[in-house]
Image: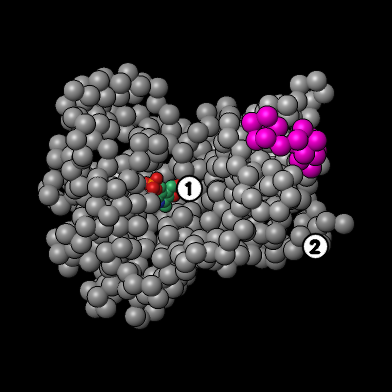
Amino acid sequence: MDIFLDGEGAIYQQLVRGLKNAIASGRLAEGERLPPSRDLCRQLGISRTTVVAAYELLRAEGYTNTVTGSGSFVAKSRFAKDRGSHLQSAIPPQNERSRIARGVFDLKNMPGRRPDGIRHAFEYGQPIRNKNMDALWAKEIRKAIPRAANRYPRVQGNPELRSALAHHIERSRGIVCDADDILIVAGVQQAIQVCIQALLNAGDTVAFEEPGYFSARKLFQIAGAKIVPVPVDRDGMVVDEIPPGVQLVYTTPSHQFPTGAVLSEARRTALLDYAQRSGAWVIEDDYDGEFRINGPALLSLHASDRNGRTIYVGTLSKSFSAGIRLGYIVAPPALQQDLLAAKWTLDFGSPTLEQMALAGLIQSGAYARHLRWVSEELLSRRTALASELMARFGTTASFALPRSGMHLLATFKSLGADAGAMLVRRGHQEGLALYTVDPCYVQPPEALGLILGFSSMTVSDIREGMAVLERVLSPLLQQAEHNGANSANVVPLKRLVK
Ligand SMILES: Cc1ncc(COP(=O)(O)O)c(C=O)c1O
């Protein structure tokens, strides 16, 4: 373990800096023992008193813990802090994108993720686990290994996968295309990045659903785009409110995130007309469009686009695996080369092995069977969640049953959105993770909204989780009622907390 002295100032200060850098860079990991002072003073040619003084300062500042007789160990919290925000604040943002990213990116508070030490979590966005797929996936990976040579991948993606997906989305999403029209990417996240690179200049305007998918919004913001929030109602994005002069529209028409609304036929027509008239591009994020819960899947927006303004984006993240990082773009032919060039700049192409294995899974029919299983499973979990919501919060919650998908949005109109933080805290104390809808908004919402994901909970987990939710939420609702609130009247938290 090398500790570097930078030659600036007193030796013991140099040593403290050297040790802090080793901790911050992870060379001295959380829980790891610092070198014994005797060894370090020999290694660096400095006095033992200097080393002991430096160790003492690190302990006093919380970087290390001392265990009598065993030595000094890197402390947990300090390590985590140094790796992120503490080090970051040592330099100003190095460019405009980093400046914006510092304002919008927070790895420690990713919405929808499951915190440690939690028994029940209504986390959203995680695909449902189908253990029956493990053996089939392993088989396809094994089959692909000898064929996936260790060469660079094709930038556009594996031809077998593109062809399998083209057949699949024609049947499931009404998109008529062939393998040449498909570009394989690393999920929606990279698809948007590719579109940004190929289509947007800093300062361009992006019409974005409000509420909407925060990760996509952050990508546009970091790219320097101006976000125009466009309201959403029960028919999806209120297309009439998109102002003139927008370069790009981002939308989730088949299952609006997070409200679950489906973009109505009239609005689909209006949106495609707008795009054609104004020359705007439309990104259709079809993140979970393949599930069928209530009847057959809807056609995609792309399927109705006669003028080639829609860039369709699909992903394997909800339907199969979020960790596989595979998705696909079907773009109008005139854009395809620019998108391909953008994909090349990002990574030269997605990993070959997983693409080949996935192609095999789709060709064998196993993927379609898996989707049917997932749809049935989601239906029973959604039914359990909805009936729990009705039974426990029938008069206080409003929610729409989504046509498909893995979450639903419940709104509690008698409580202000600022009750959310307290509710989340109380939930954690009871072993329950809850997620407010707030990150989906640019302008904070008035009422308390909870996104209740049901894909990573069994039916019995859902019931137990809802019982805990009732325990932590009911006192707040009762207090709101007591304070004379009615459903049209949002009570601010200030009036609830004495
Ligand atoms: C609206 C929406 N789009 C896309 C994604 C996922 O994108 P990716 O394919 O990058 O995993 C999510 C995940 O939660 C989502 O909610």
Q: Is residue 44 magenta?
A: yes
Whether residue 6 is visible, yes or no, is yes
Give left or right: position of 204 versus 73.
Answer: left
Residue lying furthest bottom? 244
Residue drawn at x 38%, y 72% is 202
Q: State the image quarter where residue 278 is shown.
A: bottom left
Contact check, label 2 and label 1, Cβ < 8 Å: no
Whether residue 263 sits left or right of residue 143 in the image: it is right
Q: x, y percentage for residue 226?
A: 44, 73
Span highlighted in magenta in the image: 40-57
Figure check: 236 above or below 62: below
Please state which of residues 27 and 447 is positioned toward the viewer in this rendering: 27
Number of residues whose C-alpha sits closer than 10 Å to that of mark 2, classed few (under 14), some (14–19) or many (20 or more): few
| Image position, residue 190 (x, y; %) | 34, 51
Verify whether residue 436 appears in magenta: no
Q: Is mark 1 within 8 Å of ligand 1?
A: no
The residue at label 2 has a CB less than 8 Å from ligand 1: no
Q: Looking at the figure, which quarter contains the C terminus?
A: bottom right
Chief secondary structure of the magenta portion:
helix
Compared with residue 215, is residue 1 higher up or lower down, i.e. above or below? above
Please report the residue visible at 66 percent of the width from the left and 41 percent of the height from the top. Answer: 19
| Residue annotated with mark 2 | 494
Label located before the other in sequence (2 or 1)? 1
Give x and y (percent) for residue 407: 49, 44
Instruction: Kindly identify the amino acid type of the residue bearing the numbered disc 2.
Output: Lys
How many numbered badges does the structure rendering display?
2
Dot 1: element: loop
61 lies left or right of 96: right
Spatial CA span between label 2 and label 1 = 32 Å
Q: Which residue is labeled 1 in the image?
A: 401
Question: Which amino acid, mark 1?
Answer: Leu
Res. 427 mark = none
